Image (cartoon, rainbow, N blue to C red):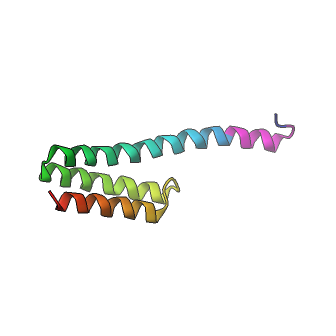
Amino acid sequence: MAHHKSAEKRLRQTVKRTAINRARDSRVKTAVKSVEAAIASGKKDSAEAALKAAQPILQSGVGKGVLHRNTASRKISRLTKRIKAL
């Protein structure tokens, strides 16, 4: 338990930040799953559209510090490669 005002404030801020970061992380994972589902369906045009929608979400996650930039680049690259193989 916090004993100082500043420590109590940090606790409050941490709770808020954690909730926001979890929501952002969830949004990123959902976007990637939607692309993977489109790839699994075998429809190249819908997969490309899903990837085009997912890319800004991944980059937003990078900008907000939820994802490392190399991780986002790797995910986009691997998804693109799988779509081109369709």
| Residue at 20% from the left image edge and 45% from the top image edge | 40
User: Which quarter of the rendering shows the C terminus?
Assistant: bottom left
| Residue at 72% from the left image edge and 39% from the top image edge | 11
Q: Which residues are magenta?
A: 3-12
Kindly report the secondary structure that dominates the magenta region of the rendered protein.
helix
Q: How many numbered discs, if any?
A: 0
User: Which quarter of the rendering shows the N terminus?
Assistant: top right
Q: Residue furthest right?
A: 3
Among the 4 quarters of the image, the one containing residue 34: top left
Give the camera-side residue of 13 and 41.
Answer: 41
In percent of width and height, residue 25 lies at 46, 46
| Residue at 53% from the left image edge and 45% from the top image edge | 21
Give the camera-side residue of 7 and 62.
Answer: 62
In percent of width and height, residue 60 lies at 42, 56
Assess whether residue 27 is covered by the magenta stretch: no
In percent of width and height, residue 29 lies at 39, 45
Give the camera-side residue of 12 and 69.
Answer: 69
In percent of width and height, residue 75 lies at 36, 58
Give the camera-side residue of 2 and 39.
Answer: 39
Relative to residue 18, is residue 32 drawn left or right? left
| Residue at 19% from the left image edge and 55% from the top image edge | 48
Relative to residue 64, is residue 58 drawn left or right? left
